[in-house]
Amino acid sequence: MKRIDTLLTPRAVAVVGASPRPGVVGGEIFRNIVHGGYHGAVYPVNPNHDQIEGVKCYPAVTQIPEPVDLAVIAVKRDLVLDVVRDCGAAHVPHLVVITAGFKESGEEGAQLENAMRAEAARFGIDLIGPNCMGIINSTPEVALNASFSRWFPKPGPIAFISQSGSLGETFLEFFDRMGLGVSLFVNLGNRAGLTENDLLAGLADDPRITTILLYLESFADPHELREIAARIGGTKHLLALKAGRTQAGAAAAASHTGALATPDAIVDAFLRQSGIIRVFSIEEALVALRAFSHPRIPRGRRVAILTNAGGAGIIATDACERTGLDVPRFSTATQAKLAEFLPPEASIGNPVDMIATAGADDYARALSVAIAETDAALVIFRPPIVLKDPVDQVAANIVRIATQFPDKPVVACTLSDSEFVAPFTTALTAAGIPVYTMPEDGVAALSVLHQANRALTAAAAVVDQFQPDHARAAAIIDRIRATGRETVSFADGAEILSAYGVPIAPYAYVDDAGFDTFMRDVGFPLAAKLDAPGLMHRFERGAVIIRINNRAGLDRAIAQLQVVAQRERLTNARILVQPMLSGRELIFGMKRDPVFGPVLMFGIGGTLVEALHDVSFGVAPVFPNQAEAMIRAIRAFPLLKAFRGQKAVAIRPLAMLIHRLARLSMAFPAIAEIDINPFIVGEGAQGAVDILMKLIT
C-alpha cells in the first residue's frame, strides 16, 4: 500500500514554477499556500527570482537546505522531466504535477508522460497528475491549499477524489456555499502515478473521514477498488459519480449477453456489488453528502411523511415510489392516535397532512406516532402566513422527538429558502437533521441512506459448499482449444457447465448408441435441433422443431433437419433431441469484459429477451446474496412468484447457479462468452435447454 500520509500532511512544500506575477498558475498555487494558513514550510522555486511574496526563492529543488515532503510542479511541459530528476536527487517523496500537455494532448505527450512515470518510479516517488489542479487538506493542523482553486473548504468528514479539475472546483464552490465540511481534495488528473485506489487505501484508517466522494471517468483497477471498498465500506460511506454513460454498440455480438451488456450497466453492477453508492449528477452528489453529514441508517424502506402542505406530501409520496421507498398506509391504531389531536380536516393515512394550522406540538406528537411504525421520516414544514408557533419552536420539537429514535433518520423539507425558514433550518442542521428545500431532494436523501444500509452487506461472501469437477471441465476446454475452434457443441458445453453444478435438461443425439433407451425414458413431446459448433439463431434458420408428439413426427423432423444441415453446409452437424420442458424460461450468461473481466447476466429468456431487454448484471465474483439481488432487480421478477397456477420459483438455487457460473468464468479465462437461453424452471425437470459457449483460442 502506498504511504499517502506525508503527501496529504507534508511538513514542507516546494512550489516549482512559483512566480510573483498574477495569473501565473505556479504563483497562484504558492499564494494559496502562503495565505491559506499552511503550518509547514513553503519554498518557492524559480531561477529567475530571488524572493516571492517576501519568501526566499531557490533556483532548483536541489538547492533547498531542508528536507521537502512535497513538490508541486507548475512549469512548461518540456521542463518537467528535469524537475522530476531534481526532486529525485533531493529525495522528495511526493510530486503533484500541475503541468498539462501530456497523454491528453496526443502521442508525443503520452510518450513524455510515460518517461515521467518511469523517472518517478526510478526514484521511488509517488506522483499525482499530471494535468491536475492540485491537492487540498483543510484540517486545522495542516491548512494546505496546494492547488489553484479559489475555494478552500472548511474542514469536515468528507474526502473528495476527482479525475477532473474543473469539475472538482465546481464541487468545491458548492461545498463552500452549502457549508459542507471537506477536509481532503485530490485531483488525480491523468493518473500517471497514484490512483483513486491508492488514495482510498490510504484513507482507510483515517477516523476523521467518514464519507468519500469519487468523480471518475474510468477505473484504474476495478478489482483492486472492489477489494478496498470491501475493507473500508463498514466504516466509511463511499459515493461515486461515474461519467461516460454511453451504450455500447454490441448488436452484432455473438451471444445475447454480448448484445445487451452495455458498459454503463456493468458499471452499475460493479459499484452496487462493491458497496459504492452511485450518484448521477452533481446535485445528487450534494444531496447525498448532506444526508451523510450526520447519518442515521434506516433498517428498512418504510417512510412516514408529515406535512402542513398537502400537495408537497403527494409529490414526496410519488418520489418515494420512483426511488423504491415505501409509504405504507398507517394501521388503524396509528390513525386513531393521530386523530386524537389532529383536526378533522387532516389526512392521517400517510402522508399525514396536518394542514396549515399545525403547530409545534402537532409536529412533535405526529412525528412520535408516525415514526414508531416506519423506518424513517420526511418532515415538511412551510411557515404559513399566520404562525401558530415560532419556527424555531417547531424545529426544537422535531429535534426532541428525533433524538428519541436514534436508529431512524429524519429529513426535513421547507418548500422555501426565504429568511422566514432560516431559524428552522439552522436549528435542525445543528442537531444533525438534513434540511432540503424541495421534497424530492428530501426523498433522494432517504433513498441514499437506504442504499447505504444495503451497501453494508453488498460485498458479503457466502461460502458455496459445492466442489466443482475442475479437471473434467479443463480437459474438455483444452481438447476444444487444441482443435483451434472458438465455439463449443451442446454436449461439450453441457459437460463443462455440469462440472460446475449447472443443471442440464435431458438430451441425446439421434446417432447415440443409447438413443432408443433415452426415448423410452423421456417419451413425448420432444424438441429436435441441429447442433454444430458456431451454429446460432437456430429458430431463424429452421434448425429447431418443437412439439414432436410421436415417432412418425420425429422421423419427419429428423429428415427436415438433415435438409437444413445440407442447405447450411453444416457438415459436422448432429441432431439433438430433448424433452419439451414446461415452466418459466430464463437466460443466464457471461461476457468477458476487457476492463471488468467476467460479467454475469440474468433475465427472462426465450425469444423475448432481445425485445424486452429485461436483464441484470453482476461482475465476478458474484456471491449468492449479490446473485439474489440480480434476480430481484429485473422488472419481470413478479413472474417468478406464484403466477397463474404456477408455483413460485425458488430463488436461492437460481442465485447459486449465477454464483457457480461466476466461479467457472473466473477459473477459466479461456471462456469468452456463455449464453444459456432458455434455462427452463418448472415443477418437474429443469435445466439448460440451449447453450452457446465461445472460447478464446
Image (spheres, grey):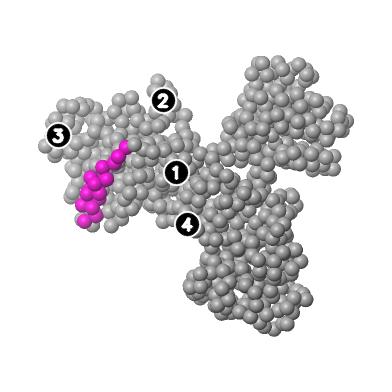
- Neighbour tally class for label 2: few under 14, some 14-19, many 20 plus, Cα within 10 Å: some
How many angstroms separate mark 2 from mark 3 (CA)?
A: 34 Å
Residue highlighted by disc 3: 515
- Neighbour tally class for label 3: few under 14, some 14-19, many 20 plus, Cα within 10 Å: some
Q: Which residue is found at the position 75% from the left and 33% from the top? A: 399
Residue highlighted by disc 2: 648
Residue highlighted by disc 4: 221
Q: Secondary structure at mark 2?
A: loop
Residue highlighted by disc 1: 617
Who comes first in sequence, dot 1 or dot 3? 3
How many angstroms separate mark 4 from mark 1 (CA)?
A: 19 Å
Q: Amino acid at mark 1?
A: Phe
Q: Secondary structure at mark 1?
A: strand
Direction front: furthest residue: 66
Q: Secondary structure at mark 3?
A: helix
Front residue of this view, candidates 292 and 514? 292
Which secondary structure dominates the residues rendered in magenta?
helix
Front residue of this view, candidates 677 and 211? 211
Indicate the quadrant containing the C terminus: top left, top right, bottom left or bottom right: bottom left
